[in-house]
């Protein structure tokens, strides 16, 4: 075997792993954004399911180990380091849930299943004077930031901004829960 044949065989052996490594490094960021959305991954005999199965296991673990139950705010702040957009959306969901609970407590027959649901929540909170004008404005600004994160193409939030957003959300949530408990 000559040095040229040896070199060609060596290149032939190493080219596919090099292409694979290069592809993974190049596509690392897009793949990292897609992995949390995956529900099922299958490659030959290896099959992994995420989502619902994991949620069931987590619920069973929380029942067996109450110390595993964590503060939702702390979870979102931890998420903000690596997935700030997801943390913003999660914090908004908590605001949404608290606002909906307050509204349903005061107006049990209101229909909140419409296209512009978050705007409707804001309008009800304002028109029924459930919260004062400054808090309605905070709700509105948090809603608009959430919409940018959810709908704007390539809109990325920095982790520090996500933590600030989470803090504001949980301040508003505490206020909404305080109003709810006074009734």
Image: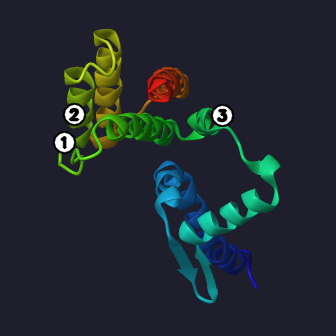
Q: Identify the residue shown where x is 67% and y is 77%.
A: 13
SS at mark 2?
Answer: helix
Q: Name the residue carrying label 2.
A: 119
* Dot 1 and dot 2 residues touching (CB under 8 Å): yes
Apparent side of residue 1 relative to residue 18 in the rendered image (left or right): right
- Per the image, the residue denoted by label 1 is 116
Q: Residue at x 51, y 52 (%)?
A: 26
Please give the residue where the numbered disc 3 appears in the rendered image: 74
Using the image, determine if residue 9 lies above or below residue 18: below
Dot 3: within a 10 Å radius of its alpha carbon, few (fewer than 14), some, or many (20 or more) residues? few
In this orientation, which residue lies closer to the viewer: 92 or 43? Answer: 92
In this rendering, position of residue 179 left or right of residue 167: left
Q: Measured along the vertical axis of the image, is residue 112 above or below residue 1?
A: above
Where does residue 153 sit, x and y in percent of width and height?
28, 41
Mark 2: give few (<14), some (14-19) or many (20+) Cα within 10 Å: some
Residue located at (48% from left, 27% from top): 173
Whole-number angstrom distance, CA of label 1 to CA of label 2: 6 Å
From the viewer's perspective, is 119 left or right of 141?
left
Which quarter of the figure has residue 156?
Answer: top left
The N terminus - image quarter:
bottom right
């Amino acid at each position: 075997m000559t040095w040229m044949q040896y070199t060609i065989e060596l290149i032939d052996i190493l080219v596919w792993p090099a292409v694979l490594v290069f592809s993974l490094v190049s596509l690392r960021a897009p793949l990292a954004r897609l992995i949390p959305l995956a529900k099922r991954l299958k490659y030959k005999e290896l099959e992994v399911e995420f989502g619902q199965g994991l949620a069931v296991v987590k619920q069973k673990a929380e029942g067996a180990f109450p110390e595993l139950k964590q503060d939702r705010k702390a979870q979102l702040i931890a998420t903000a380091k690596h997935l700030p957009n997801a943390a913003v959306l999660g914090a908004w969901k908590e605001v949404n849930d608290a606002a909906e609970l307050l509204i349903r407590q005061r107006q049990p027959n209101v229909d909140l299943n419409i296209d512009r649901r978050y705007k409707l929540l804001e309008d009800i909170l304002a028109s029924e004077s459930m919260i004062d004008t400054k808090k309605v404005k905070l709700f509105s600004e948090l809603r608009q930031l959430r919409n940018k994160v959810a709908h704007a193409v390539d809109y990325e939030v920095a982790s520090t901004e996500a933590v600030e957003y989470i803090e504001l959300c949980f301040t508003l949530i505490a206020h909404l829960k305080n109003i709810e408990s006074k009734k």
